[in-house]
């Protein structure tokens, strides 16, 4: 049974836990945005294309990444207008649930000294932001495929309007949070 099917089956229990009167008030996973910042590489003379990073992100997510160009020049960062700054993929529906399932079951246990996700990473509107130091923790990538280790930013967007409902949803999706001391 996939995570999506489990989520649909557990919605009445989550509705009762959150005290919602209508099943449509129960939060669901809206989208997952996976981003890789490449702006620092664009300023280096030896980096001309990002095809290996693009291929890695395509392998991780199963979708073609989109190159985001800078909108303005920032001299302190040696960034000029229309320079490559980020690779981004937006996952929705079944692919978002599949990505969360792989993240929880295979990726996070491979992160060094992992003891749960921090509860401070909620943004106040029901979304969760997670950063991974390298794309090499994904099992889909062989170590020789990762030529340049780049930071991954994962934004989990839900339909919840507060952090408590979003945390309850993510807990029902088997996401592990740190214990409060």
Image: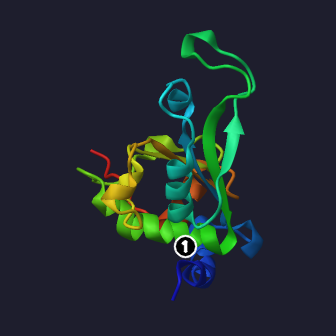
Q: Quick one: 4 or 140, which is closer to the camera?
A: 140
Quadrant into which the C terminus falls: top left
Asked whether the viewer can see residue 172, the reply is no
Q: Quick one: 92 or 77, which is closer to the camera?
A: 77
- State left or right for residue 151 relative to residue 42: left
At x 40%, y 43%, the residue is 148
Which residue was labeled with disc 1? 98
**x, y percent for residue 162:** 64, 49
- State left or right for residue 14 relative to residue 116: right
**x, y percent for residue 126:** 62, 50
- State left or right for residue 142 relative to residue 20: left
Depicted 150 relative to depicted 100: above or below:
above
- State left or right for residue 51 relative to residue 171: right
At x 36%, y 68%, the residue is 106
Residue found at the very far bottom of the displayed protein:
1
> Which colouring convention does the figure follow?
rainbow
At x 57%, y 41%, the residue is 49
**x, y percent for residue 8:** 63, 81
């Amino acid at each position: 049974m996939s995570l999506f099917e489990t989520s649909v089956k557990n919605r009445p229990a989550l509705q009762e836990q959150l005290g919602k009167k209508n099943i449509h008030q129960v939060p669901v996973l809206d989208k997952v945005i996976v981003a890789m910042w490449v702006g620092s590489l664009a300023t280096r003379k030896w980096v001309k294309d990002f095809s290996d990073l693009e291929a890695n992100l395509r392998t991780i997510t199963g979708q073609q990444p989109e190159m985001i160009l800078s909108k303005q020049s920032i001299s302190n960062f040696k960034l000029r207008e229309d320079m490559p700054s980020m690779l981004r993929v937006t996952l929705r529906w079944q692919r978002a649930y599949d990505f969360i399932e792989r993240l929880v079951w295979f990726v996070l246990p491979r992160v060094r000294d992992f003891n749960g996700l921090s509860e401070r990473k909620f943004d106040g509107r029901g979304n969760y932001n997670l950063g991974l130091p390298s794309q090499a923790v994904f099992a889909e990538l062989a170590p020789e495929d990762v030529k340049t280790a780049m930071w991954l930013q994962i934004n989990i967007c839900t339909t919840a309007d507060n952090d408590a409902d979003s945390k309850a949803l993510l807990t029902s999706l088997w996401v592990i949070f740190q214990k409060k001391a």
